[in-house]
Image (cartoon, grey):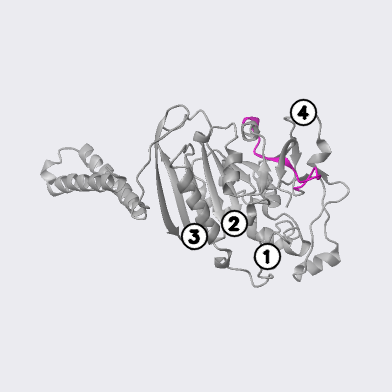
Amino acid sequence: MSSPRVAIVCLVLAACALTFFTLRPDRLPMPGLQRSIDRLESQIAIIEGTLGRVQHQIPWESTQVSLSDSTNLHSYISEDTLVGPTRRFTMHRVGPSPTTAIPHILILTIINDHRSWGSNNRNFSHYLKMISNFTHPATSTSLGFLVSSPQEYERMKLHLLDTLPNSQHPYTRVTLLHRSTNTLPTNIKTSGALPLSRADRHADETQRERRRLLARLRNLLLYSALRYEEAVVWIDADVIKIPGEAVEVMLKSGKDVVTARCTHGSADDYDLNAWAGPRVKPTPQELAKIRQGHLFVPRATSGTQFLSYHIDDNPHKFIELDSVGGTFLFVRADVHRQGAVFPTLYVVGTEWDTVDGWDGIETEGLCFLARTIGYRCWGMPNMQITHDDS
C-alpha cells in the first residue's frame, strides 16, 4: 500500500477510536484511558502533518535497491515550496537506521549555476563521485544543496531521479533547494549588488557584497537542511579532490571547527580566509571613511600566518586558527546550533549606526562567533584538498 493510503487509513482508524471514547464518557473507567486518548490526539496531529507533506509527493513508485551488504532499503521523494519562496526537493531513504555508534554527518554545498562545478565540463555527477570516496559510511551521511539557477536545479533534480533510485541510494537524506538571489532583499545603504560571478569573485571591490550573499545562502541552507546530524561538512562545488579519510579524521579529532589546506594550481594556499595572527586595522582616517560606507579591504599583515607555513610530515597535525575558509570546512553541529553561523556583515568594529565594521564576515566571522561561546577553530596543513584551476 502506498504511503498516502497508509496515512489515510491510520488517520481514519485513530479518529474513529477517539470519537468512540469521546462520545461515551460512561465508558471511561480511569484517568489512564484519558491519557491514551491524549496520545491518540497527538498521533492524529502527526499523521495530519504527514498528509500535508504527502500531498506534494511526486508520482513515483518506491524502488527497492540493494547495497553492497545486501541491505534492502526503500526511498521516497517529494517536492514542495517553502516560505521565501524556496523550492525543496527531497529524497529520503526508508529502511534500517544506521547504527548510532557511527556519527551522522550532513554535507552542504552552495551552487550558483552550472559553472559553479568548475572547468572542463565538470558537473554534479563528478561531485557525487568525489564524495562517494569518503571512508565515512554513506549510510550515516545526508546531503544538502542550495542552487540559485532554476535550470541547474532541474538538472540536479533529474540526475538524482535518474541515478539514486535506480541504483544504490545509500544516503539517509538528500535535500535540494532552489532560491533565486533575485528574491533576496538588499540593504539600500550598500551597493545592492548580489554578485556571484566567477569572473570577478576575487576582486576587492566585490568581496564585501559577494561574501555577504554567500553568508546568507549558507545560513539559509544550514537552517533548512540540518536536523539530527552530529557534524556539518561544507564543501565548495568546485573542489575536485578530497582525501577519502578527511571527514573521519576530523570527526575523531574531537575538534570543534576544522578546515583543510586548499591548493590551486601551483598555489599552496588558495583559501586565504584560513589564517592565524594579526590583521590590518583601519587608521582613524580609514575608520571615518568606513563609517561613511567607503570600502575597506581586510587583509593580512607581516605577522599573519597561513596553513602552508606549517607543512611538515605529520599527516594529522592541527594548527589553531583565528579564521577558517569554506572550501572544505568541518563544523560540529552543536557549534552551529548554538549560534556560531555565518555573519552577513563585518562583525569586527561594528557599531549600531553603521552597516559594517571592517573584518570578520562569512567564514571568518564564524570563528569570531564560535570563540565567544567557548569553541575553537583549527586547520590541518598537511590535509590537502584541491580546487579547480578555473
Residue at the extreme front of the image, as rendered: 120
Task: Tell me the mark number nearer the camera, choosing from 2 and 1.
Answer: 2
Instruction: Kindly indicate the quadrant of the structure image that contains residue 107.
Output: top right
Query: Residues under labels 1 and 4: Cα distance?
Result: 46 Å
Q: Position of residue 316 (x, y in %)?
A: 72, 30
Q: Amino acid at mark 4?
A: Asn
**Where is mark 4, residue-wise?**
314
Residue at the extreme right of the image, as rendered: 302
Q: Amino acid at mark 3?
A: Thr
Q: In the image, which residues are magenta?
A: 252-271
Of mark 2 and mark 1, the one earlier in the sequence is: 2
Q: Nearer the viewer, residue 382 or 265?
A: 265
Q: Quadrant of the N terminus?
A: top left
Query: Residues under labels 2 and 4: Cα distance?
Result: 35 Å
**Where is mark 3, residue-wise?**
86
Q: Is residue 316 magenta?
A: no
Other residues around mark 1 within 10 Å, as few (<14) / some (14–19) / many (≥20)? few
Image point 46% across, 52% down: which residue? 89
- Give SS at disc 3: strand
Q: Are dots 2 and 1 in contact, CB under 8 Å?
A: no
Of mark 1 and mark 3, the one earlier in the sequence is: 3
In the image, residue 348 sits, relative to residue 130, either above or below, namely: below
Query: Residues under labels 2 and 1: Cα distance?
Result: 24 Å
Other residues around mark 2 within 10 Å, as few (<14) / some (14–19) / many (≥20)? many
Q: Position of residue 86 (x, y in %)?
A: 49, 60
Q: Are dots 1 and 3 in contact, CB under 8 Å?
A: no
Q: Which mark is residue 217?
A: 2
Q: Nearer the viewer, residue 209 or 14?
A: 209
